Image (cartoon, rainbow, N blue to C red):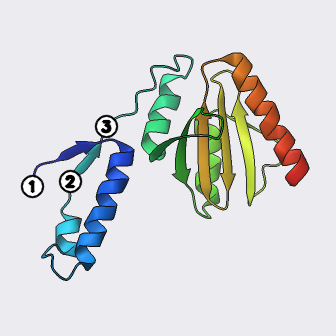
């Protein structure tokens, strides 16, 4: 079977279709076929964020599996750590984030002023919002801090 190359979001859609095929009684596709799937994610294009260091970029590309935008239209990536505290600490270190005092297990956020990143987590779901404008980053960071002050 030939290796398929696709974006992370295309990959999610592709996997959903594969799973539906497994459960379709009219399709001969099986779990064995699914296990043979050979898919490579196309690396993220983070060229719009030149301030992000190479090691940070590599980590982002390795752990975040869905591209999205936040409620304000900022570019955002999604990931999942589940209840894995080790992964939470690794994300903190690899993203070079300073953590707000809300850095407890259930939810919280971190920020990296130099690379203009805001990392949040809640119940194992993670988001990483990237910025290329210092003013917008600062505004979003302040809004994030305010939300945590009022809700946590």
Cα separation between marks 2 and 3:
13 Å
Residue 52, visible in the rendered structure: yes
Cα separation between marks 2 and 1:
7 Å
Using the rendered view, name the quadrant where residue 112 is placed: top right
Using the rendered view, name the quadrant where residue 97 is placed: top right
Check if mark 2's residue and mark 1's residue have beta carbons within 8 Å.
Answer: yes
In the picture, the disc for residue 1 is 1
Q: Nearer the viewer, residue 89 or 134?
A: 134
Q: What residue sits 20% from the left and 53% below the top? A: 38
Secondary structure beneath dot 1 equals: loop
Q: Residues within 10 Å of mark 2 (few under 14, many from 20)?
A: few
| Mark closest to the chain's N terminus, 3 or 1 | 1
- The x and y percentages for residue 103 are 78, 49
Residue 113, visible in the rendered structure: no
Name the residue that disc number 2 marks.
38
Q: Is residue 8 left or right of residue 21?
A: right
Q: Is residue 42 left or right of residue 90?
A: left
Q: Residues within 10 Å of mark 1 (few under 14, many from 20)?
A: few
Secondary structure beneath dot 3 equals: loop
Q: What residue sits 58% from the left and 37% below the top? A: 94
Eyeballing the image, is 29 above or below 149?
below
Name the residue that disc number 3 marks.
42
- The x and y percentages for residue 54 are 48, 24
In the picture, the disc for residue 127 is none
Q: Is residue 67 left or right of residue 38?
A: right
| Mark closest to the chain's N terminus, 2 or 1 | 1
User: Which quadrant is the C terminus positioned in?
Assistant: bottom right
Cα separation between marks 3 and 1:
18 Å
Eyeballing the image, is 56 above or below 64?
above
User: Which quadrant is the N terminus positioned in?
Assistant: bottom left
Q: What residue sits 15% from the left and 80% below the top? A: 26
- The x and y percentages for residue 23 are 27, 79
């Amino acid at each position: 079977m030939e290796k398929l190359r696709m974006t992370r979001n295309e990959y999610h859609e592709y996997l959903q279709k594969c799973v539906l095929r497994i459960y379709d009684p009219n399709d001969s596709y099986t779990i064995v076929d699914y296990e043979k799937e050979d898919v490579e994610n196309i690396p993220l294009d983070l060229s719009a964020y030149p301030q992000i260091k190479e090691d940070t970029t590599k980590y982002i590309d390795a752990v975040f599996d869905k591209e999205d935008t936040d409620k304000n239209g900022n570019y955002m990536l999604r990931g999942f750590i589940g209840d894995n505290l080790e992964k939470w600490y690794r994300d903190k270190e690899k993203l070079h984030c300073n953590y707000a005092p809300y850095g407890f297990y259930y939810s919280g956020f971190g920020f990296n002023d130099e690379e203009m990143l805001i990392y949040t987590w809640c119940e194992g779901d993670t988001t990483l919002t990237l910025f290329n404008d210092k003013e917008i980053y600062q505004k979003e960071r302040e809004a994030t801090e305010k939300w945590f002050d009022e809700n946590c």
